[in-house]
Image: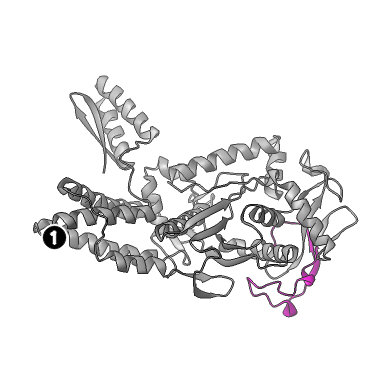
Amino acid sequence: MLQFYNSLTRKKEPFIPIEEGKVKLYTCGPTVYDTAHIGNFRTFLFEDFLKRVLIARGYKVFHVMNITDVDDKTIKKTVEEGKSLSEITSHYTDLFNHDLKTLNILPADHYPAATNHVDDMIKMIEVLIEKCHAYKTDDGSVFFKIESFKDYGVLTHINMAEIQQSDRVDSDEYGLDNPQDFALWKAYKEEDGDVAWDSPWGKGRPGWHIECSAMSMAFLGDHFDIHCGGVDNKFPHHENEIAQSVCASDTPFVNTWLHSEFLMVDGGKMSKSLGNFYCISDLIEKGFAPGEIRYIMLSGHYRTKINFTLDKQHEAKASIQRIQSLKDRLQDLKENSSDEYPDEKSNYDTALENDLDAPNSLALFFDWVRATNSALDKDALSRDDVAKGLNFISYFNDVFGVLPDSGRIPQDVMDLVSKRETARQNKDWAKSDKLRDLIGSKGWVVKDTPDGPKLSSK
């Protein structure tokens, strides 16, 4: 049985979905005011890994990931660049979608944008006011009254009796040591420019926290299975989501909360001033294959910090090549198909089911890789063993998604092949060799034949 460490209860628990065989999953998506960086994608890849494990274990997953396209940050960006909100957010949403495809992240069933669900937010705020969990201020803003929810702090275990509570806070983000009544609706200010909607309380816009509650409940209902995010989302965002959602619906909100730890870079915090701030496109330009990025991000347990360094590419590349090499060896010997797997798959599954223990599952899988290569060297693998082995590699890759898709050559690789062929025709051998190496860094081998260049995955 699957077990997850539930942030709500602070313990590992068997996972039992509300509806048998089905999982309703909500993941906090990007705030589209800038390009998502690799720290963001540490969380998005953990969530993809979770989803892939659920699917591999036979669950039908209904997944919703929101797009935060109106909040303090997006509005500030519009002011700085003198552009409309939609110009800013559509640009960065497109970049995010491109990165999702690059990293082979399974698409969500829905990507609701906050600006398309303002009516849902207004309705939810009206309910909270009616139930005396929220109040309007003189300027037309609406705040959630945290003292009205006796379980406030249930996720982060804040001891309200020991903390001085101030009146309220207008900012989307604030410190854990100062819980405050938070904004559900923010009255219009001149610096908001053209960003405003009409409401029963006057012109304004929703606060960040109400957005996720309204959108998750619109698609998944008042009570669903799993909510994910990074540890930085716990407070105030997820804590406030719980409070306003439970108070609005009078039902439990989410059964299982999963949070991924921070990504460190070069042993510390990622920073532009230190020159270690990377987006996915930066790593691709440095020669990383998408599978190598996935491997590095998924090789550590999601509840532990991962230290990312550029040097880790070598380890990731070698590990992926070991798997691909074994797959190729088995494929050359394949004579029949099978629905079965090697016995080692059982322990591999047990590791995955133990709170997504990626490090242990990888170790067990590579033990099998080593043993299988040894058996092949001794010509000691039966036809059935070959078929089972190919099934296991396919199953492994369904979960980790690190092997290149040999049937789909990325367009950027095709472009490099074309440029290399032009260089060869011009007898620019130095440029040709450089392009060949760049193609190789992306996980592909180019061979020159009488019929033209041929590509194969490493």
Q: Quadrant of the N terminus?
A: bottom left
Residue shown at 45%/48% (left/top)?
A: 105
Position of residue 401 measured from the top left corner of the image (x, y, whole percent): 38, 51
Q: Quadrant of the rendered structure where residue 391 is?
A: bottom left
Residue at the far bottom: name it.
161
Judged left or right of residue 245, residue 320 is left
Give the residue type at disc 1.
Answer: Ala
Judged left or right of residue 46, residue 333 is left
Mark 1 element type: helix
Identify the residue under disc 1.
Answer: 375
Residue 38 painted magenta: no
Judged left or right of residue 55, residue 31 is right
Residue placed most toward the observer, 211 or 340: 340
Residue shown at 56%/44% (left/top)?
A: 35
Position of residue 157 measured from the top left corner of the image (x, y, whole percent): 64, 75
Residue 172 painted magenta: yes
Position of residue 5 measured from the top left corner of the image (x, y, whole percent): 50, 71
Question: Is 123 drawn above or below residue 361 in the view shown?
Answer: above
Q: Main secondary structure of the magenta part?
A: loop
Residue at the far right: name it.
138
Question: Is 127 drawn above or below residue 412 in the view shown?
Answer: below
Residue placed most toward the observer, 383 or 240: 383
- Is residue 37 in view? yes
Q: Quadrant of the rendered structure where residue 436 is?
A: top left
Residue at the far left: name it.
378
Residue shown at 33%/48% (left/top)?
A: 403
Q: Which residues are magenta?
A: 145-174
Position of residue 288 measured from the top left corner of the image (x, y, whole percent): 37, 45
